[in-house]
Image: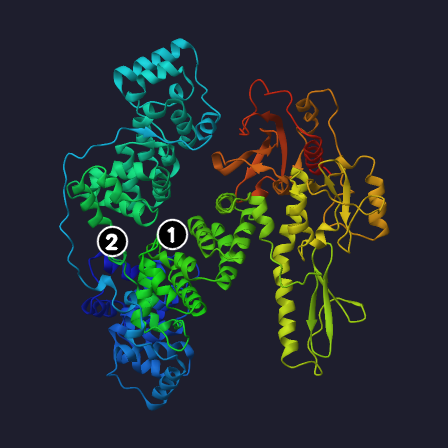
Amino acid sequence: MSTLDQFARLEHRGVTWSPVALHTALHVLGPAIAPFLAEEVDEAGLDADRRRSGLEVLAALPTDEAFTLLLDRAREKYVLPPLLSAMEAFPRRAARLLAARAAEPQALSLLRAHLETHPDLVVPSEAAALVAEANSRRVPEAPVSALPGVLADPPWTRSRPRPEPVVLEGLPVPAPGECWLPGEREEWLALPSYHNGTDTPEYWANLAEWISSTGRPCGHGLFEAGPEDLARSVIAKWVPDDSWDGERWGRRVSARFGLDAVAPLLHLAASSPHGSGFVLLPYATAEVAALMADWLARLKAARSTALSWLERHRETAARLLLPAALGVAGPERHNAEAALRHLHLELGVDVVAVANSVSEKAGAAVRTLVEVDPLDVLPAKLPEIGNWADTRLLPQVLLEDRATALPARAATNLLTTAALSRPDTVYAGLPVAARACDPASLAEFAWAVFERWQSVGAPAGDGWALTALGRFGDDETVRRLAPLIRAWPGENAHAKAVTGLDVLAQIGTGTALTHLNGIAERVKFKALKARAQEKVAAIAATLGLSRDQLSDRLVPRLGLDDAATLVVDYGPRRFTVGFDEQLKPYVLDPDGKRRKDLPKPGAKDDPVLAPAEHKRFADLKKAVRTIASDQIHRLEAAMITQRTWTAAEFHEVLASHPLLRHVVRRLVWITDAGRSFRLAEDLTLADANDDEFTLPESATVRVAHPVGLTGELTAWGQVFADYEILQSFPQLGRPVHAFAPGEDLVPQLQEYVGRKAPVGRLLGLTQRGWVRGEPQDAGVECWMTRPLPAGGALVACLDPGIAVGAVDVFPEIAFSSLWFSATGRGAWVAPRDGGPATFEVDPVTASELLSELESLHA
């Protein structure tokens, strides 16, 4: 039996780790237990909970050896909290053993903090001198008088009398109403129906009779697809029996029946708040208001829906919440009060005026409610800052003048303002505290807290350590965080990655939005990519741009000059940096000779300038590596989707951009009038005859597809050959395909059915717009879809399918069928009738689609 198992057996017998219990354990297991216990917590396959338990037991052992074993592992995951507990439990032992290793930075940092907590402890003079020296290097702490009140004397440390809550009975409840966004109801109504039951009048009538007479839960078929009059007559008695796919059919039912559907949709939303809650957004009823207020106060997964509802209904929401906010004490009143405060403080709704329109007493009571000092609006249970975030062991936070720093207690109060905040609602004291601090040191402090949180296993209850980066972080935070966000879904941490997207959006700098957009465009995890796309689209909408337009404006310039080059100055030597067709940087000597790489600084170069310039070039290469493939892929996708730019946008965000310009001038462009041109090296425009071309101001421009260059393709090929222009992706030499004219399209695709292809090539189709289907039984993806610009999608059923997480299980896969889905949804088998025999497709999409299918067997 392992040492941990023996300890677990003692715990199972009711032994807790008091000194008496530990004495018992030592008697049972022997005095040399510590090294064996350490051996087991170091075991590679040990799960997190067992390792934490082992470390906690090790921290409770009253021996030098146990403490030393913890100190040896101080930088490892989960170790710091038990080590700090051991320091607190055995302060003299901790001081003695830390002092013996005070020459080590980690031990010195712990000793310095330990002596602050226990100033009566005495350590050897050598260790005391090291502590004094470390203290002398720290920035002096600011006096309390120099700190903002929320850090010096925070409201959560003192009690304040609260006014007696006013209860007003009999306040009027507004009549139910609806508020639809422009086009929203039509959009919801147009969602596809997948009801596959019998649709005879007798079937629907019998179902309606059953619902009316029994009132028992049943499916949604009648209300999604049945006769409207019949369904409306019984919808008030309907109880949905399943929330699966409710975000789709719930919207159809909502759009069909309006207020008549509120009761069953409330049942649906309550059973699946995160998935289906938004079907209630158009409705303004007392019941919906109560549910939204509850979600706002209590349910993290549905809080965003509640915020959207409040934003949509505003004054109407205030009227609906008023009776509960001034009702008897209880959860419903507490929730309504919180919602009214949000309307007043965050959305600017004059809830006092709304209440005054009901009665003067109501107005006075609401004024008392919402005009409380925002700093005093605190939750019933305050967050606790764990010892893993001991601010004495973290970088100092400098005040704005950088001459003084926050004392440790004030820094802990700063963390509390972050813990009191939510991703969508900031505690009022946080911006006050942040403004008093130096931004750079605040960002470094926040990152150190985040790393500590990661080192203790990223406990969900302390998730504020991640969201705080959105309030305190900077561009360096973004550069550190973005790679982690990309990797987290693969570590079973999708929710953490989604929160990371919120952090990037909250930081909101150009660098942050660039990385957010990069995740939206190129990340291998579908769910994360979709959420990032939603974020970018929302940000773009607030700026009055499309997501593509925002993407154009987020491409960094990387310090390049207007000539799209970079000069590296070593003092005596200067080099010019250019970019090839793949945006890889290259270096030119002063005489124009091309070098493989930038030479390292030599003895004759400027000793300060040259190393800095060499590092700048290294940073440029690293930055370009992360940008180049995304931008080349984006322009190739624009050619395939035939995305357009205005003439002004072409000049502003493409031709004038010092990095994108290197790709733009290697492509042929075409206007809406069919005139093709290229961007010359001197930034003038030229046509296929190499004559100067003037782009009309009213023109729209797109990357030319060879399908649209009929008659000019040879001429353009000659121009690019004459000027030795290499293209960043295949354009002029791109294969061109076409369907046989005048014939149905689906039959022409059947030649690709039954032919086996390597699974890697099928997966490669996802880089060209194909989408893998949802995993079915045994985690096998049984179909892929190819969305089409005109609507719908081509569906390829797979035999045997793609095994999720083990794609090499089926190394070769064939299409068992190819069919067109008007709804765009796939299935593991084709419809019995084979689906539509043809579909609408433009020449460019047709060429790309056939090229994609050909690539499987090339």
What's the distance in space between the residues labelled 2 and 1, CA to CA?
16 Å
Quick check: 507 left or right of 80? right
Earlier in the chain: of badge 2 and badge 1, it is: 2
Q: Tag 2: Cα neighbours inside 10 Å, few (<14), some, or many (≥20)?
A: few
Query: Which circle marks residue 379 in the picture?
Result: 2
At numbered mark 1, what does the secondary structure look like: helix, strand or loop? loop
What kind of residue is marked 1? Pro
Measured from the top left, where is residue 248 in percent x and y? 43, 30
Viewport quadrant of the C terminus: top right
Image position of 309 with respect to 491: above or below: above
Measured from the top left, where is residue 144 in percent x and y? 28, 74
Query: Which circle marks residue 511 in the picture?
Result: none
What kind of residue is marked 2? Pro
Relative depth, front residue between 164 and 769: 164
Task: Give residue 570's quadrant in the image.
Answer: bottom right
Q: Tag 1: Cα neighbours inside 10 Å, few (<14), some, or many (≥20)?
A: some
Image position of 495 with respect to 273: above or below: below
* Number of numbered discs overlaid on the protein picture: 2
Image position of 659 with respect to 297: above or below: below
Viewport quadrant of the N terminus: bottom left
Relative depth, front residue between 657 and 359: 359
Task: Give residue 54's quadrant in the image.
Answer: bottom left
The residue depicted at 31 percent of the width and 31 percent of the height is 266
Quick check: 160 left or right of 546? left
The residue depicted at 32 percent of the width and 16 percent of the height is 233
Quick check: 595 left or right of 652? right
At numbered mark 2, what does the secondary structure look like: helix, strand or loop? loop
Measured from the top left, where is residue 360 in percent x and y? 18, 41
Q: Which residue is mark 1?
A: 423
